């Protein structure tokens, strides 16, 4: 519920850009800056999350409220910003804060998944989690009707209320206190006959020692790990900035010594950039080039959502069997080829039906590669590196790619229409994928065997 509403807040601003921008008092160039704010926030959040020693239900609720309140404030403050002559600055600031809440919330959840789910099941588990992203795309269609009848600002207010409702629903189920750092690279196994079955998160909540490795009591009833950091009494524990810097220095050198991880980060950077450029111009392409109204854009967006869902289901059923490396290399090439074909046919034929068909295929393949890549990075993480770090580096690198893709999308669209930014980003992604393929072609196909040959020696 939480992830679904969060994704709606992030995603709905893209396909409805031609209709939301005038309601906010922005032109499309200014609106692109508005969109960039969330990606800018995600880059920082990838490192802010490293300051957490543990997360509690109150820290999760805090970032959730930040996302909710800033979304609700958009329709309220738009006229105020316009009166003060600071529309762009004020709206970017709100969007930036929304992004902080959104990405911290998502980072907390992904770190937990990466820590507890066994290597052979990561792709399936992440596929279920990422289905919320797919469902949000399908649900975006209903906002076309809402925006058409009541205006774009109403959508912000409705999303804020949905986010608030999701907080009330989810708060009782948040973990009381959970460590997000791995003291050791190991999987936690639970007796299948126990009350919690084989669900690591529930099991570890009943057995705190299994969460923190070797935990010792100190004065005042608090706890500390083997490295001496206090964990606290159920509250969020923040590491100092110097501690985060030391942590990055300790782990980054090992991560960037792995050519496999570095080349995958490069591919992820290009793939997210290509997808962001595509998303930024999607609504503009339909509205400006083909005369679609709000409802029609919503229907087209939902169709793309079904393509995403197909990619998610493919990941759920096939990625672990085929091997993460094989899926990324094979279907990554097909995804890039689909975008190139779209760019050529859009110029030659100009058929919106054919264009949407190719874009649905791209969404299916790109989503499959994206979810599989999350699992690949988690499995390929060196045993002496905290899993949360490699995942947050992945998210931050991807956010930089998304930021650059969004920034370049509209200027390139003005030069050569929708096909130009699509083709340029697709070719760039294919080149980066080629580098990854060359680096990983000798790796075993089985995801369970990847880690033993991708980890650099200590």
Image: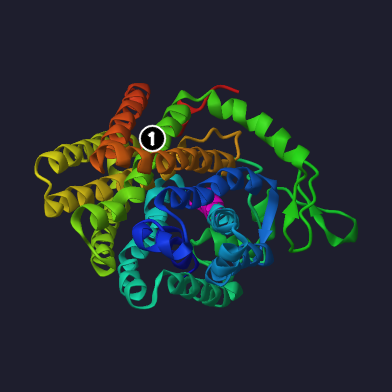
Q: Residue at horizontal 33%, vertical 29%?
A: 428
- Position of 197 relative to 224 (above/below): below
Find residue 210 and report its image quarter: bottom right
Q: Nearer the viewer, residue 279 or 105?
A: 279
- Position of 264 relative to 63 (above/below): above
Say left or right for 367 vs 303.
right
Q: Which residue range is magenta in the image?
A: 109-117
**Outermost left residue:** 349
- Position of 201 relative to 348 (above/below): below
Q: Position of residue 212 (x, y in %)?
A: 68, 51
Q: Nearer the viewer, residue 398 or 209?
A: 398
Q: Look at the image and name its color scheme.
A: rainbow
Q: Residue at horizontal 29%, vertical 35%?
A: 426
Q: Position of residue 276 (x, y in %)?
A: 38, 45
- Position of 61 relative to 133 (above/below): below
Q: Nearer the viewer, residue 362 or 422?
A: 422
Please indicate, yes or no, whether residue 335 appears anywhere in the rendered image. Answer: no
Q: Residues within 10 Å of mark 1 (few under 14, many from 20)?
A: many
Specify whether residue 324 is painted magenta: no
Q: Position of residue 452 (x, y in %)?
A: 46, 29
Q: Which residue is mark 1?
A: 270
Say left or right for 87 vs 403.
right
Element carrying mark 1: helix
Placement of the C terminus among the 4 image quadrants: top right
Specify whether residue 110 is painted magenta: yes
Say left or right for 47 vs 411.
right
The majority secondary structure of the magenta stretch comes to: helix
Q: Position of residue 289 (x, y in %)?
A: 21, 52
Q: Residue at horizontal 51%, vertical 27%?
A: 455
**Outermost right residue:** 219
Q: Residue at horizontal 66%, vertical 58%?
A: 55
């Amino acid at each position: 519920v939480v992830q679904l509403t969060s994704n709606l807040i992030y995603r709905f601003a893209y396909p409805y850009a031609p209709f939301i921008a005038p309601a906010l008092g922005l032109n499309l160039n200014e609106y692109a800056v508005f969109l960039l704010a969330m990606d800018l926030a995600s880059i920082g959040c990838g490192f802010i999350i490293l300051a957490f020693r543990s997360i509690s239900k109150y820290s999760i609720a805090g970032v959730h409220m930040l996302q909710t309140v800033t979304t609700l404030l958009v329709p309220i403050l738009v006229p105020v910003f316009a009166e003060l002559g600071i529309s762009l600055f004020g709206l970017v600031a709100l969007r930036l804060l929304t992004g902080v809440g959104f990405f911290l919330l998502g980072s907390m959840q992904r770190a937990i998944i990466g820590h507890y789910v066994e290597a052979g099941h990561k792709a399936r588990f992440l596929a279920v989690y990422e289905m919320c992203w797919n469902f949000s795309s399908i649900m975006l269609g209903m906002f076309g009707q809402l925006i058409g009848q009541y205006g774009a600002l109403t959508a912000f207010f409705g999303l804020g209320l949905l986010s608030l409702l999701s907080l009330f629903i989810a708060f009782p189920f948040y973990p009381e206190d959970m460590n997000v750092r791995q003291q050791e690279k190991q999987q936690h196994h639970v007796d299948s006959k126990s009350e919690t079955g084989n669900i690591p998160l529930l099991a570890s909540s009943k057995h705190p020692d299994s969460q923190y490795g070797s935990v010792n009591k100190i004065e005042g009833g608090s706890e500390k790990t083997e490295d001496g950091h206090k964990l606290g009494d159920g509250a969020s524990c923040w590491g100092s900035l110097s501690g985060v810097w030391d942590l990055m220095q300790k782990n980054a050198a090992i991560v960037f010594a792995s050519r496999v991880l570095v080349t995958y980060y490069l591919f992820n950077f290009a793939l997210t950039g290509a997808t962001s450029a595509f998303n930024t111009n999607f609504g503009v392409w339909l509205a400006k080039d083909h005369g679609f109204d709000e409802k029609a854009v919503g229907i087209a967006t939902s169709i793309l959502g079904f393509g995403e869902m197909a990619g998610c289901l493919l990941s759920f059923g096939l990625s672990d069997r085929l091997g993460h490396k094989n899926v990324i290399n094979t279907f990554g090439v097909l995804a890039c080829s689909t975008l190139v074909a779209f760019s050529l046919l859009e110029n030659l034929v100009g058929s919106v039906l054919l264009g949407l068909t190719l874009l649905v295929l791209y969404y299916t393949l790109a989503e499959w590669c994206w979810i599989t890549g999350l699992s690949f990075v988690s499995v390929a993480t060196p045993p002496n590196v905290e899993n949360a770090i490699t995942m947050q580096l992945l998210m931050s690198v991807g956010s930089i790619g998304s930021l650059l893709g969004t920034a370049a999308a509209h200027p390139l669209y003005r030069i050569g229409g929708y096909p130009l930014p699509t083709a340029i980003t697709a070719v760039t992604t294919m080149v980066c994928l080629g580098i990854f393929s060359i680096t990983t072609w000798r790796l075993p196909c089985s995801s369970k065997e990847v880690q033993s040959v991708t980890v650099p020696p200590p």
